[in-house]
Amino acid sequence: MTTVSVQLGDITAIEVDAIVNAANEWLLGGGGVDGAIHDAAGPDLLEACRAFSEVRPGVRCPTGQARITPGFNLPARFIIHTVGPVWRGGLNGERELLATCYRNVLQLCPPNDIRTLAIPAISCGAFGFPIREAASIAAREIRGAIESGLNLETIILVAFEPQTFAAISASTTGLRDPAD
């Protein structure tokens, strides 16, 4: 049975098999969680990301897709990079693209023997996705994966600030242990 929890803190310090990076399409670092992960993982992460072929000029990971690298200097063995959509009012497929991010991240877990996973609030920082709606999508996709037989021990939804923590907590009540 998969345990789902919500944690307030720094995703780069969590000891799990893999953390998720809310990346940009070029995978070369950026602001927010992406920059923090690149800083904490060290320069080898940048080189690993550069090794991914561009699918079109400047794009190594299109929106909705996911790529995996070693964790390098992080306590996590792997980093799963996914590119969430930029919020443009919700009329440009943003919800489905965000759902696809979660599906693609979770699909990378079994073949890489990932049993414990930490996920930030994808697309909710600089990309502007409304946190309550994003948290609801995350909960729906995680629930669907678990019900379809995804066999992870632990999924930690990580919030960097209290507002995000509250929104994620409210949206995932049915997924989490009542004591959480």
Image (spheres, rainbow, N blue to C red):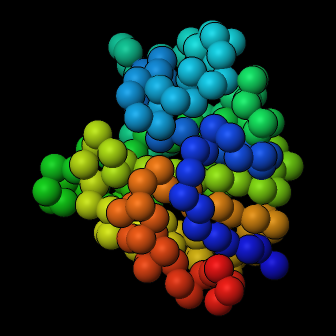
Q: Nearer the viewer, residue 68 or 122?
A: 122
**Residue 104, how many percent across, how many down?**
57, 51
User: Can you name the residue that lies furthest to the right here?
Assistant: 113
- Give the vertical position of 22 relative to 104 (above or below): above
**Residue 173, how many percent across, how many down?**
53, 84
The residue located at (71%, 46%) in the rendering is 14
**Residue 76, how many percent across, how many down?**
76, 39
Report the quarter where the C terminus lies: bottom right
Q: Nearer the viewer, residue 23 or 120?
A: 120
Report the quarter where the N terminus lies: bottom right
Q: Residue 96: tell me if it is visible.
A: yes
Q: Quadrant of residue 52?
A: top right
Q: Quadrant of residue 74?
A: top right
The residue located at (67%, 72%) in the rendering is 4
Q: How many marks?
A: 0
Q: Residue 137: tell me if it is visible.
A: no
The residue located at (48%, 74%) in the rendering is 169
Q: Quadrant of residue 94?
A: bottom left
The residue located at (60%, 81%) in the rendering is 175
Q: Nearer the viewer, residue 93 or 174?
A: 174
**Residue 99, how many percent across, how many down?**
44, 61
- In the rendered structure, the answer to whether residue 78 lies left or right of residue 89 reads right
